[in-house]
Amino acid sequence: MNVLCKRIDVLWLVTLVATGVSWWAGESPLGMDGGWAVGIVFTMSLAKGLAIALDYMELRGAPALWRRFVVGWLLFVILAVMALWLWAA
Amino acid sequence: MGFAVLFSTTVQTIPGLPEESSDAAYTAEAGQPPSGRVDEIRLSGDITMWFVIVLEMFTFGLLFVVYAFARAKDPAMFRAGQSSLDLRQGAINTVILLTGSWCVARGVHALRSSRVNTGARWLWSAAALGIAFLLVKGLEYKQKLRAGYDMSSDDFWMFYYLLTGFHFMHVAAAVLIVAAIAFLVPRRQWTATDTQAPETAAVFWHMVDLLWVVLFPLVYVLR
């Protein structure tokens, strides 16, 4: 097994753990408590999104324009949604 | 940066590339990390698929922000709708899609290493997981429709069916694309360095996964 496959395996486990953390934040009383949960859950989404974009889609080694577009989209959408969520809370 | 470097999907040697680019670059020895001082800039998959991905991401991005804006205007209504969703089903589907992405990535790496049958098995596994996602989602739709929730119930349910339904169609398309590649892989004479078709299917699958990673907390987790 080469280094890239090991990295893919580790990232898969990391994204599963991040999903578990999101689930926990949503199910626990913390999940009903505004800012904390919003921060934790969207941080987990950002981590998963970066793993998918940079490693699975292989944008880490792609022309910068494509990497910046996808990572920028992810950051913009998550920050915009977070801001609207916290504004409504 | 020249036009060719920006859009090329073939291997190019770029001296002085930042260190971050070295991990996912490939040498002519397929599936192997780069060695020595040669780094490469390479876009995985076909350029046309990337333009499709840009279009899809703009569309979904707009829908996500509009959903969050509508929720900000009436959080109580959205909270009531979200409370009737089963977070477990959303989480199970997240695990299914993430595992599918892992299978697709391992499949592409296997094909780059000339392990054709292994690569095809990874891709079939991903397609099966995609079908599992569709079944779980279909079950959820059935439960909600039986409970009387449809697109006309309120704004939350309108957005729920719009966002998840649109995503559902993309998962179905990804399953078909990946299954088609898995079927073709043992029947074509693709070489280890000619993996553009599997890569093109893979980036579409990963985009569908990326969209779900944002959709999952929006609709299921945060109430």
Image: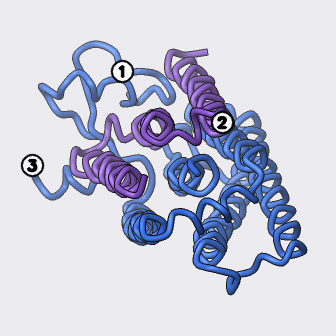
Chain colours: A purple, B blue
Write the residue at 57% across / 33% down: A30
Element at label 3 = loop
Question: What label sits on residue B1 in the rendered view?
Answer: 3
x%, y% of residue B128?
A: 81, 50
Chain assignment, label 3? B
Q: Residues within 10 Å of mark 1 (few under 14, many from 20)?
A: some
Q: Is residue A3 left or right of residue B20?
A: right
Chain assignment, label 2? A
Residue A9 to residue B6: above or below: above
For marks 1 and 2, give the one nearer the viewer: 2
Element at label 2 = helix
Looking at the image, tell me whether mark 3 or mark 1 is earlier in sequence order: 3
| Residues indicated by labels 3 and 2 sit on the same polypeptide chain | no
Q: Which residue does the numbered mark 1 point to in the structure image?
A: B34
Residue B58 to residue B17: above or below: below
Query: Looking at numbered disc 3 in the image, what kind of residue is underneath it?
Result: Met
Dividing the picture into quarters, in which one does residue B51 lie?
bottom left
Dividing the picture into quarters, in which one does residue B172 lie?
bottom right
Chain assignment, label 1? B
Q: Residue furthest bottom?
A: B152
Spatial CA distance of label 3 from label 1 is 22 Å
Spatial CA distance of label 1 from label 2 is 38 Å
Question: What label sits on residue B189 in the rendered view?
Answer: none
Q: Residues within 10 Å of mark 2 (few under 14, many from 20)?
A: many
Question: What label sits on residue A23 in the rendered view?
Answer: 2
For marks 3 and 2, give the one nearer the viewer: 2
Give the position of the N terminus of chain A as an image quadrant.
Answer: top right
Foreground pick, A31 / B38: A31
x%, y% of residue B103?
A: 68, 37
Dividing the picture into quarters, in which one does residue B154 lie?
bottom right
